[in-house]
Image: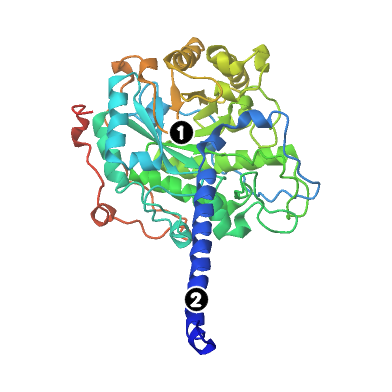
């Protein structure tokens, strides 16, 4: 047996080990919860959950005041533009696939996608430069982005990657998620949508959104868009140009009420501002919209009205994924099992509506190349493409969150729709958003090591 004197020296050691065990357990639990939260937050399915909002419009209280004071001061923010003159290197008909920032920065994966583009009727890649976590895919020179740590170095040298793509005949499009930005909202709660207590509101996935009415939110996103244009993107595609599609959003702290028209005005004013700010860069401007926006006459609580948005963009890109239409939509028993009919009806509605306003905006649909509730093979993917062609829409973009695409659904290369030789870029105007951007770096290529070279994008070894 041990005496009390012999036990005392061991107690601190045992207590220390017990405390260490608790600390390790807590750290492990936090790390695991953060990983799970990040996976949930980064779910690309949030990009396509439009069916849930068909009967669940947002309810804003009578106390939310409209705070926007923006009025376009230039004709460049409204009406049709000559895209051939604007972008001589743009394919006659853009046919694209989507790549995340991680895919774009991964040499072998990007080479595979470029090979797919070169071997098929495709000619473009939509590259994510800012995602729905608020992460910028390259090291940004925007000072606000730097101060909040928004840059994640997924792409080592953006300019060089774009030069390689242009040289291979692949037309790059920048995808920029706008108002779904939990990173900015967390770092700057004053820019977030807030609840009645003044705290940042969270959607059903626990994510915060920035307020579409905040001018500084506009400026931040346009600073990134201008940076992308300077790097070599000739087309900027805005996604999540809307309010949250969550019926739980019923109250804000701003004090007065917002009706549907005010939501629409906020989105329209942002697009007018964006087009005007990007005019000196001669880039094509596209806005993604829910597929149901093609047919719905209301804003469905998210601020998207097709005709109003089309006036301020060159393209509207409806996400007409058949898996996200409820059964019976358009009189189709199961839209997910009838992809051709679903896409055809949705695009026909959009065409009829845009013809009435003569906005000049064209339609380029996002099509479904993934399975959700119904297995999608080459047949289902091709049915959507053919449906678009039957509507005289010869442009499309394929969405797959894993960036794995169905080659068997695609036709062969079309020389008439190839990416044209890249014109000389610039000179670009000096950026006036001094509070948001620091001096433009001229040595970024030297400072950053490129993670891969496409080496003329030879298809050998793919």
| Element at label 2 | helix
The label shown at residue 288 is none
Residue 142 falls in image quadrant: bottom left
The residue sitting at 44% across, 21% down in the picture is: 395
Give the residue number, with chain letter if any, for mark 2: 14
Residue 351 visible in the snapshot: no
Q: Dot 1: few (<14), some (14–19), or many (≥20) neighbours within 10 Å?
A: some
Query: Along the line of sight, which residue is nearer the eye, 224 or 378?
Result: 378
The residue sitting at 48% across, 64% down in the picture is: 24
Asked if marks 2 and 1 touch (Cβ < 8 Å), the reply is no
Give the residue number, with chain letter if any, for mark 1: 401
- Judge whether 182 appears above or below 266 on screen: below
Q: Is residue 172 left or right of residue 253?
A: left
* Alpha carbon separation for disc pair 2 and 1: 50 Å
Q: Is residue 140 left or right of residue 239?
A: left
The residue sitting at 45% across, 59% down in the picture is: 149
Query: Along the line of sight, which residue is nearer the eye, 226 or 126?
Result: 126
């Amino acid at each position: 047996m041990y005496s009390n004197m012999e036990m005392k020296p061991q107690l601190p050691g045992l207590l220390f080990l017990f405390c260490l065990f608790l600390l390790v357990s807590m750290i492990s639990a936090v790390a695991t919860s953060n990983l799970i939260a990040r996976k949930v937050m980064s779910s690309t399915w949030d990009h396509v959950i439009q069916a849930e909002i068909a009967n669940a419009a947002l309810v804003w209280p009578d106390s939310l005041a409209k705070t926007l004071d923006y009025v376009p001061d230039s004709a460049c923010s409204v009406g049709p533009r000559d895209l051939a003159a604007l972008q001589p290197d743009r394919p006659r008909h853009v046919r694209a696939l989507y790549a995340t920032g991680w895919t774009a920065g991964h040499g072998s994966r990007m080479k595979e996608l470029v090979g797919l583009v070169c071997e098929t009727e495709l000619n473009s890649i939509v590259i994510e430069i800012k995602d729905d976590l608020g992460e910028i895919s390259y090291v940004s020179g925007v000072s606000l982005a730097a101060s909040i740590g928004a840059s994640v170095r997924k792409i080592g040298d953006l300019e060089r990657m774009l030069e390689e793509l242009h040289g291979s005949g692949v037309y790059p499009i920048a995808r920029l998620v706008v108002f779904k930005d939990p990173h900015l909202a967390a770092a700057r709660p004053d820019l977030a949508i807030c609840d009645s207590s003044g705290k940042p509101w969270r959607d059903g996935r626990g994510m915060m959104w920035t307020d579409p009415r905040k001018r500084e939110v506009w400026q931040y996103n346009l600073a990134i868009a201008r940076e992308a244009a300077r790097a070599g993107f000739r087309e900027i595609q805005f996604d999540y140009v809307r309010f949250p599609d969550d019926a739980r959003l019923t109250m804000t702290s701003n004090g007065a009420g917002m009706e549907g028209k005010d939501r629409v005005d906020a989105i329209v004013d942002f697009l007018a501002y964006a087009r005007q700010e990007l005019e000196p860069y001669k880039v094509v401007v596209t806005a993604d919209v829910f597929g149901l926006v093609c047919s719905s006459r209301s804003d469905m609580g998210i601020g998207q009205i097709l005709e109003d948005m089309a006036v301020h963009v060159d393209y509207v890109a409806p996400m007409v994924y058949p898996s996200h239409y409820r059964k019976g939509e358009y009189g189709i028993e199961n839209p997910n099992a009838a992809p051709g009919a679903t896409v055809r009806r949705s695009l026909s509605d959009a065409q009829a509506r845009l013809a009435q306003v003569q906005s000049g905006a064209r339609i380029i649909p996002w099509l479904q190349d993934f399975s959700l509730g119904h297995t999608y093979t080459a047949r289902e993917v091709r049915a959507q493409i053919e449906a678009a062609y039957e509507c005289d829409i010869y442009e499309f973009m394929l969405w797959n969150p894993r960036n794995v695409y169905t080659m068997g659904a695609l036709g062969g290369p079309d020389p008439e729709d190839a990416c044209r030789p890249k014109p000389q870029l610039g000179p670009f105007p000096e950026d006036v958003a001094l509070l948001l951007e620091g001096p433009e770096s001229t040595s970024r290529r030297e400072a950053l090591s490129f993670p891969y070279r496409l080496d003329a994008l030879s298809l050998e070894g793919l």
